[in-house]
Image (cartoon, coloured by chain):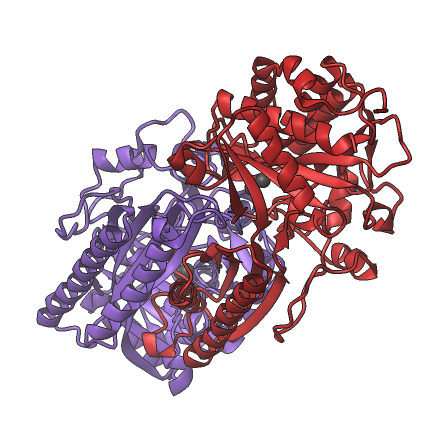
Chain colours: A red, B purple
Amino acid sequence: IHEPPHSFDPRSLLSSLSVDVQLLLSQIADLSTFSDTPAPAITRILYSEKDVLARRYVKNLLGLAGLSVREDAVGNMFGRWDGYEPELAPVATGSHIDAIPYSGIYDGVVGVLGAIEAINTLKRSGYKPKRSLEVIVFTSEEPTRFGIGCVGSHLYDIPYNLTFECSRLMARNEAVMKALKTTFDKQNISFLEAARSAGYAKGVDDLSSVFLKEGCYSAFVELHIEQGPILDAEGISIGVVTAIAAPATLIVDFEGNGGHAGGVLMPHRNDAGLAAAELALDVEKYVLESGSIDTVGTVGILQLHPGAINSIPSKAHLTIGMVITWLEVAEDTRDIDEKRRNEVIEKIHESAVAIARKRGVNLSFKILNQDPPAHSDKSVIEAVEVASKELNLTHKRMISRAYHDSLFMAGVSPMGMIFIPCYKGHSHKPEEYASSQDIENGVKVLFLTLAKLSST
Amino acid sequence: IHEPPHSFDPRSLLSSLSVDVQLLLSQIADLSTFSDTPAPAITRILYSEKDVLARRYVKNLLGLAGLSVREDAVGNMFGRWDGYEPELAPVATGSHIDAIPYSGIYDGVVGVLGAIEAINTLKRSGYKPKRSLEVIVFTSEEPTRFGIGCVGSHLYDIPYNLTFECSRLMARNEAVMKALKTTFDKQNISFLEAARSAGYAKGVDDLSSVFLKEGCYSAFVELHIEQGPILDAEGISIGVVTAIAAPATLIVDFEGNGGHAGGVLMPHRNDAGLAAAELALDVEKYVLESGSIDTVGTVGILQLHPGAINSIPSKAHLTIGMVITWLEVAEDTRDIDEKRRNEVIEKIHESAVAIARKRGVNLSFKILNQDPPAHSDKSVIEAVEVASKELNLTHKRMISRAYHDSLFMAGVSPMGMIFIPCYKGHSHKPEEYASSQDIENGVKVLFLTLAKLSST
Ligand SMILES: [Mn+2]
Ligand SMILES: [Mn+2]
Ligand SMILES: [Mn+2]
Ligand SMILES: [Mn+2]
């Protein structure tokens, strides 16, 4: 039979598979030095000085890998290796390098530096891709600075209203530009100003150049630590992600009169902080009452104003992250679980209204995002499973409870994810740890998966 | 009868009483410009640039009033007008100029600039004091920066332990120096470093020079806005303070494992933020259950770590300010009410222990201070009442629910306070307001009170 000159052959690739895991570990260690907090507590905030330095470091590695590098107006980086049929839609892989305050060194980073090492390994093996391969480094996967996560992969609209319509994946349109122009960080710096200070969006007011078009990639696959305890507990090497959970973010503000903590008697108070405390506990209560072990809800931010020992809080600001996941990936349960999450959100809203009325405080309740879940594509799932089998690695299908850029890439491309174990599921804290063996396994699976997906 | 040449004569003083209230208001307005937040929201933090500028402004006024100015190692300022019997213990008056974040322009300031104007008025009237008169500007009445209030008037020891012994007014001793050396602000700057950056404590490691000795003043009187609604609501011009409430401050920290808000299921969490929310609501509950309208408790600070949308809080830091006041000033009820406050603190402690056990979080529970109440001295109360009568001003005896430097001055001197109304009791927020008429009344009462106290 006739085959193209460089077709996919896992056996020959396997024989030449030589991941330089020591180099990769040293790069992970290098990248961890770009942090606003001392190691092992990583803090790398979008467009900060340390983020810019980290981007420069990664950009250099993309160049050293022989990739042609492009940066877009928000700082997404793309490193392309042209295939021998460059007119075909490329296969992409990648993740993020930003880090929430006091987090760990592996989240996102394994999927970026691991992707570059997978490409280097493919090149060393003599493999020639039919489809072009791209490494993507996404801007602001973490929502730390502007409250919006996965900016690079999915710029979604700022809220919304009190009706609980599901937002669905939004068209990348005028609304996005408007949202980014009206989004400010705590220092009142706009997203666009911040982007410009980091060297992006120069002379650009229209970010439509950033928007990826549906079909722009033939597949997207992201290597990532699990950020949960399952693979570590069960001693399994590879998680084959079949679906990504559906996050929702609520922004709640209470406002009362404040006043002197000694001077104002209890009956005359309308303490915004206590309203917030009540709502935080109600979030936990309604999540637990939802009847689904996979429903989680978290008040990650709770800020009091003015925040003084002897002042009654006049303002309280909460963000509530709601995630619903599902045990079955069948299409019919997806809708059931999304409905369950939205019912919990509705209860939280009713509770916030009741607390505000009871305590005489004003309420602002916004749904920042309420995204639907995403399913991995069968082609990517199977490529990851085949790769794991070829490598004799234990593997299992699982869902991702944390969201990732892949959730939004599902809107433009067939998508899948490769999980590796992380110690006790620790993530978003300094204890986050992935072993060199697990990282090497992940890069090997990515190597074979990219080869398979780019050869057809 | 034989009388000294310049003895106290209210009638002649009254005829020459000419408070320059317009000048005083313009000085209050001037001082309000030294703030880290735009007017009318005042923020003037201990030893900050704006605090140093405000100190310089006030020091200049003390000099212009012909007072001999001394600053001690923590920045307390003393402006002395020598009496004709300078060997007698002086009469002192004063307050503070620091301001908690987003507060108002009158708290403390009226008692400092009003005292200088009272001195100027006394000088203009031709009055010659027998005892020397001193204006004191106290350092850090507000606990904002280092968690310790009334630093200048009472440097008290940092805690302590879980036994609920009442600390009582502590001896000003080695323990104080140790406490100040081990106290750091949020930027990890020590109290002494901060003092040095503001130009104080130069080459000084031993702050014993700051400590006032018992009997160093024959009387201390502080003019202050009420910071409560009573005088304003009842249309009364002058509050004669008979006692100052007994504050206590608790510092509570919970610590759990944190983790990724999407990845960790609810049963595996030990959310420090929810522990804090529960305790905040318990504080309110136990205060309300105490059976005393005058018992108040406030969670003014609640900080979550890392404070990110998608992170489970691993640490929560609360400060709880507890104040118990009492309606009767009889000696026998004082102890009853202090006991009641300490019972509430004991309940809060038990609750914190129970919450920590239930939620699997670690607990640190400290009593930063647990001061006893202070009573005004009969001599000062009567001088203020006589002055109010001479001026035909409506007045009433009342207690101060907010604490003041006067609370601690009671440890070294007979003490009293003059309250003036403030609009609706607003304080510690930008809405704080005292009318020019009420400020003028307060300065007139202070004028006569100082004359009376310094003439005997
Ligand atoms: Mn993350
Ligand atoms: Mn990530
Ligand atoms: Mn105050
Ligand atoms: Mn004050």
Residue at position x 54%, y 47% in the image: A400
Residue B8 lies left or right of residue A64; in this view the side is: left
Q: Position of residue A29 (x, y in %)?
A: 56, 20
Q: What is the quadrant of residue B95 in the picture?
A: bottom left
Q: B69 or B338: nearer the eye?
A: B338
Q: Position of residue B38 (x, y in %)?
A: 63, 58
Residue at position x 77%, y 38% in the image: A75
Q: In this orientation, does residue B240 appear?
A: yes
Q: What is the quadrant of residue A152 in the picture?
A: top right
Position of B150 relative to A66 (above/below): below
* In the image, farthest residue toward the bottom: B234
Q: B99 or B341: nearer the eye?
A: B341
Q: A23 or B82: nearer the eye?
A: A23
Q: Position of residue A301 (x, y in %)?
A: 49, 54
Position of B70 relative to A169 (above/below): above
Residue B250 lies left or right of residue A29; in this view the side is: left
Residue at position x 53%, y 73% in the image: A363
Residue at position x 17%, y 58% in the image: B346
Q: Position of residue A226 (x, y in %)?
A: 51, 38
